[in-house]
Amino acid sequence: MKALRLSLPAAVATALCVAAATGQAQVKVTTSGGEVATLSQKNVVDHMIVGDSLEVEEAQLALTRSQNAAVKDFANMLVTDHKAHLDKLRKLAGKSDIGREANSADSSAAIAAAAFGQLQSMGADSGFDKAFVDAQIANHTREIAALKTMRAAAKDDDLQKDIDATIPVLERHLARANAVSAQLGAPSAAKPPADAGSAAAPSAEKPLNDSTSSAMKKPAPDSATKKTPPVPAKPPTD
């Protein structure tokens, strides 16, 4: 028994060293659904590939549904950035010491897919614009927090650098999403009524009221033209 007690710590230490050497270090993260998942760097790569793919799908949908210029510009940014990141991730997944593997405990993909399905069911109106931008705010807020935690599972230098470069991009997306959301929530400028010009001030040709009109029509008294009464004739003298 004594020999067994001494061998157990050594076995555990050996297992940890092997896991670190093969790049299979794992980290516990709380997923979007509240579950605790244990992820390896293969799982992290898969997590990011699925997330970027859904972001591209949502943004391309917005380009076909939205009529708002700010929303369309934001969607174009998402398509460009996430497609470029997907190309990098696929190369990382192709490396023998990294790879890619899905983790069933990571529910973030299911949550993003459900949000995408809701957007697909909506029509092309201002309601879609708000729902799309709100979804992007939620997605990017969750993903920034997730990558900061998941980075501990990345043992490959290239994967670490990719995560470090990706977080600032997501933060820029989040800032743009918040700005567009503020624009969508701003009240529209009130249009003046069609007869605002006539209602604002009375016409110069129209008298303000009857008394003013009468006063304007009645000539002012003129002492020079005022007639003097006739002088009575004197009676004749005897």
Image (spheres, rainbow, N blue to C red):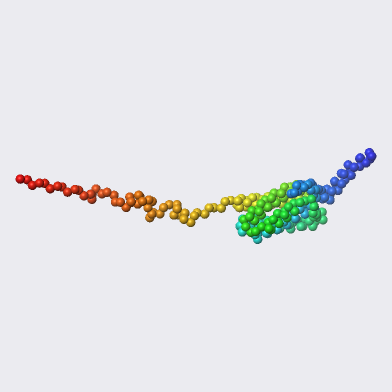
Residue 234 appearing in the image = yes
Image quadrant in which the C terminus is located = top left
Rendering coords of residue 84 (x, y %): 71, 57
Viewer-proximal residue among 64 and 119: 119
Counting from the top left corner in percent of width and height, residue 63 is at 65, 59
Taking the view exactly as shown, the residue that stands out farthest to the top is: 2
- Residue at figure coordinates x 36%, y 51% from the top left: 210
Q: Position of residue 212 (x, y in %)?
A: 35, 50
The N terminus sits in image quarter: top right
Outermost residue on the left side: it is: 238
Observer-nearest of 232 and 175 = 232
Quadrant hosting residue 53? bottom right
- Answer above or below: position of 91 versus 27: below
Give 64 or 195, whichever is nearer the viewer. 195
Question: How many numbered circles are shown?
Answer: 0
Residue at the image point whose x is 87% and y is 46% from the top: 15
Does residue 29 appear to the left or right of 122 in the view shown?
right
Q: Quarter of the image holding residue 74?
A: bottom right
Residue drawn 66% across the image and 57% down it: 122
Q: Position of residue 8 (x, y in %)?
A: 90, 42
Looking at the picture, tell me which residue is in the foreground, 61 or 191: 191
Q: Does 113 sit left or right of 14 as displayed?
A: left
Q: Left or right: where does residue 158 sit relative to residue 222?
A: right
**Residue 172 in view (yes/no):** no
